[in-house]
Amino acid sequence: MRKLLIFLLVIGYAVGSEIRLLSQNFYPAGLNIIEIKNPENTKILIETESKTVYFPANSEKSFFAIPYACKKLAILNVIKDNRVIYRKFIRIKPKKYPVSRITVKERKKTEKILKRIINEYKLIRKILSKYTPKKFKETEFIKPVKNPKVSTPFGAKRVINRKKKSIHWGIDYKAPKGTPVFASLSGKVVLAKELFYTGKTVIIDHGLCLYTLYAHLSKIKVKENQHVKGGEIIGNVGSTGRSTGPHLHFGVYLCGERVDPDLAFRLKL
């Protein structure tokens, strides 16, 4: 009986609202698009077995992401005026991730460096959580380097100097030092500086809580608060920060939630 009631409620929500899913990136860390007519006072709630996350829905086309840790089922809720108006149970498609083993020269972490690392982490998390209006007109993500060759994919389990570390939260593209790096979408540069782990780093705000990150650059060719167009050169491939050689680390984030760039490239925006 309970299952039947839930089923009827879901049907009622779907029929009674103008809501349409525009993508089916139903994988861990999958970025998706939903169309919501009259999105005022609306937000998106994703429930999974391990966490619950909210995403803003202030535009007719809004993004939501499946958390990386979600492996089986996610529940998509659209909430308007504190009432669920749409609900969909999403079965998560399996995706395998390799183990990435690298050896890097560790720098001694003094108290000053540890404080720097903590402050930089807080700064990045604060930046990635901010919602701003849409800033791009492109209909798809642009690859950040020409003829990209993936050296480490998103989601790889990292083993650094024979010690298990965290997940690799981006894609590494192997390329010669100096290779031009392009903005994946139009937006505003919100960070352009050298960080301890990621070296010379650029973060671009594309609006709708969507951000891209470009790390280990040899040169930064943009400034903070500068507006850039999709495909514009923002820097050059390098090996700054904790790095084993010239490459670009490219990350995509939605409201701070890590997104698989490979899945994002499949979207029609």
Image (tube, rainbow, N blue to C red):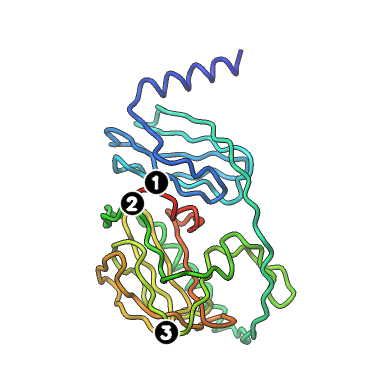
Q: Which mark is residue 63?
A: 1
Q: Characterize the local packing of mark 3: few (<14), some (14-19) or many (20 or more) Cα atoms within 10 angstroms.
A: some
Q: Earlier in the sequence, mark 1 or mark 2?
A: 1
Q: Is residue 84 above or below residue 202?
A: above
Instruction: Provide residue 13's location: percent of width, then percent of height.
Output: 41, 23
Toward the right, the furthest residue is 162
Separation of marks 1 and 3 at Cα, in angstroms: 33 Å
- Against 145, residue 68 (above or below) is above
Q: CA distance from mark 1 to mark 2?
A: 7 Å
- Label of residue 225 in the image: none
Name the amino acid, label 3. Answer: Gly
* Element on which disc 1 rests: strand
Snapshot quadrant of residue 32 = top left
Q: Are marks 1 and 2 in contact (CB under 8 Å)?
A: yes
Name the element at disc 3.
Answer: loop
Q: Is residue 213 above or below residue 72?
A: below
Residue 44 falls left or right of residue 18: right
- Looking at the image, the residue that sits furthest to the front is 147
- Quick check: can you spot residue 258? no
- What residue is rendered at 41% in x and 24% in y? 14
The residue under the point 29% across, 43% down is: 59
Q: Is residue 193 left or right of residue 3?
A: left
Q: Residue 48, percent across and down? A: 58, 40
- Check residue 178 in the rendering and tell me which mark sits there, or answer none: 3
Task: Select label 1 or label 3 by which is in front.
Answer: 3
Residue at x 51%, y 71% (from the top left corner): 173
The residue pinned by badge 2 equals 208
Residue at the farthest top position: 1
Q: CA distance from mark 2 to mark 3?
A: 31 Å
Q: Amino acid at mark 1?
A: Phe
Disc 1 packing (10 Å; few <14; some 14–19; many ≥20): many
Comparing 246 with 125, the one in front is 246
